[in-house]
Amino acid sequence: MASDEVPSLAWFGQSLPAVPDDKLIATLDLANGHAKLDQQTPLSIFPTDGTGFQGQPALLGHSQGRRFSAVFKQVSVQQTDHRLIFSLLDSVNSLAVELSMELDPGSSVLTLQTTLENQGEDDYQVDWLASGTIPLPDTYSECLTLHGRWGLEFQMQRQPITAARLQIENRTGRTSHEHFPGCLAGTAHFSEYTGTVHGMHLAYSGNYRLGIERLSTGTAFMQAGCLHLPGESLLAQGEKLQSPPLHVCHANGMHGISRRFHHYVRNHVLPAWTRAPRPIHANSWEALYFDHSTEKMLPLIDAAAAIGAERFVLDDGWFEARRNDTAGLGDWRVDKSIYPDGLHAIVTHIRDKGMQFGLWFEPEMVNPDSRLFREHPDWILQVENISTPLARNQLTLNLDLEEVQTYLFNCIESLVDEYDIDYIKWDMNRDLVLAGSHGRASVQKQVQGVYSLLHRLTHRFPALEIESCSSGGARADMGILSYTGRIWTSDSIDAIDRLRIQRGFSLFFPPEIMGSHVGQDTAHLTGRSLSIHTRAAVAVLGQYGFELDATRLDTIERSHLSHYTAIYKRCRNWMADAITYRTDTRDERLFIQGLVAANQQQSLWSVVAETSLLTTSPERLILRGLNKHTRYTIAVAHHEHLHYYCKKIPVWVTAGVTISGELLMTTGLTLPVMPAQSALLIECAAVSDTSGTT
């Protein structure tokens, strides 16, 4: 390779034996067949079509049809302990690229980011700029992506990697329910603990494109970046465009990928306040919807406090004209017709019960039936002479406008100051359509506007906790998590739906940021009725809370719920560093997931039968992540609900057992008969033996 050629990433995977560079390169040298270019073009760190590369380039663009094919040369490389910055130049087309690669030694996550500069006199239209391009081993033949819809996000989907390009595009203006900006690629049938796997995640909350491609030469790679709408990214001379960060890693099995991403998110993405034990939420939404009044809210607050809530969140319906979803968005003033003295009585009552106060906002949106829209109809994202379709009876404010940013900041700042708000549930309930500003497509500027407003608020109120909610889980990514420390995973609180939703979510994100509530006995989105045990056993593995009318609980339900709440409180101190373990079960209807403390002294396991199982006796419960030399006490939270379904229940379920970690991780435990939609929650705690050692 010539010294000025754009380098190739020769290998990304497990550590290689120490050999001289020239010998390693010789083992990776490319063969070349007939009927192709005389010199096969290697996959560089920034592949372009001007070099003869025939896969998806890292850059597509032009200047009024010219400067359409780029050829870069390496100018320089800057190196620090864990970072490389490659400076590339296309002198013919007057384009410069700076590509950063930074390896986090703690997680082995590699972060790539690309900056493009137009050095030419003519404007340069960017159609595509990849954040990074990563080679895949020849042995990789399968990929896993996440897809879904409203109320059923993060569903795993597997596809073969064939001689073609698998491409996912998101054009919703938010991270979306339908797709997720991340994927896994690996060897055939890779599972939680088998196979080698690459993981990729684009830290961005807007439109994106990600792809996996295998060329006819056999070269395979993964690539991701922001999706640019027509005319959206036009660079004048001297202007730069920076891509979102792309995080990639390699590990054995899906568990290994999750472990790396969880470590990275905890240590390099999340706000510092997420390190504290996560408080238990009670949210007013499914208890009251828009039917707000002081008289109805106070008993709800009392009942929530009685079952262990530590933060009460006043959801949608508290502001002017908001008696339904057709009016009021944008008018962020307390509705004095339902709260004559403002929220002071509500907030005082919440604090008297020892709870924190949270408030719902949807700052990016406005109803046409609002004072704000009537006064400022020009403040919305729009395309001239085209009517913008409504979604949930609302339009989107243009956060590219400084006056909109100022208005929203002042509204939120005033309310946070007046009521000493501890937490904001930041919602965003529609896709962006006709997202124009000043006559141009403006999704990227809208996303940057959201980030800018959040940055300003968190700088003004460092202790203010913010949750990212977007019709549930439609804005879950490492970009938004730099400003928020909690994701509302889905609007579906049906625990059976949540099994797959939360399992997919956990591939990339740690449990303590996953909003996971116990809902009503009959789920509002699905109509499915579930026991309190199943609802709680699923919710307790995330940031636990309640989305129900606690005044309707009977004595037995209240007692059971208080017990599960006590378990969460007992375990949450170690959850911020917990390792997530998902079990590959023989029967895919059986879901087993656990959290194990970093010091291996405690763990919490949820076992749920999604539907009727194939065998009367389920497979054995094999735990993971324990210390094989340590003895553990096993205790089941509740088992009485299972007695009706079998003549005999294993003694460890009813009386507990103390057993070594080695046995728990090899022979395991016999599970009881588990009917459809039943659950067990199991605590595992290290104990001292008679010699005083564990």
Image (cartoon, rainbow, N blue to C red):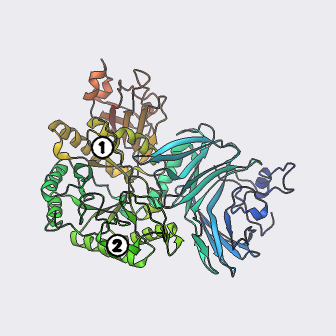
- Quadrant position of residue 475: bottom left
Q: Is residue 587 above or below residue 142?
A: above
Q: In this view, does 130 lie above or below 568?
A: below
Residue in the image at 45% along x and 38% along y: 624
Q: Nearer the viewer, residue 422 or 64?
A: 64
Q: Callout 2: helix, strand or loop?
A: helix
Left/right of residue 457 with respect to residue 2 in the rendered view: left
Q: In this view, does 692 lie above or below 462?
A: above
Question: What residue sits right under mark 1 in the picture?
Answer: 524
Left/right of residue 9 with respect to residue 405 in the rendered view: right
Question: What residue sits right under mark 2 in the picture?
Answer: 408
Q: In which quarter of the image is the N terminus?
A: bottom right
Q: Which of 365 and 659 is in front in this view?
A: 365
Rendering coords of residue 152 (x, y %): 42, 45
Label 2 is placed on what type of residue? Leu
Q: Do the residues labelled 1 and 2 touch (CB within 8 Å)?
A: no
Total tally of numbered discs in the picture: 2
Task: Pick whichever of labels 1 and 2 is earlier in the sequence.
Answer: 2
Q: Callout 1: helix, strand or loop?
A: loop
Left/right of residue 480 with respect to residue 50 in the rendered view: left
Q: Residue 371 carries which label?
A: none
Residue in the image at 61% along x and 74% along y: 234
Rendering coords of residue 425 (x, y %): 32, 60
What separation in Å lies between label 1 and label 2 (alpha carbons)? 32 Å
Q: Quadrant of the C terminus?
A: top left
- Quadrant position of residue 671: top left
* Number of residues whose C-alpha sits closer than 10 Å to that of mark 1, classed few (under 14), some (14–19) or many (20 or more): some
Rendering coords of residue 363 (x, y %): 35, 66
Label 1 is placed on what type of residue? His
Residue in the image at 72% along x and 68% along y: 68
* Number of residues whose C-alpha sits closer than 10 Å to that of mark 2, classed few (under 14), some (14–19) or many (20 or more): some
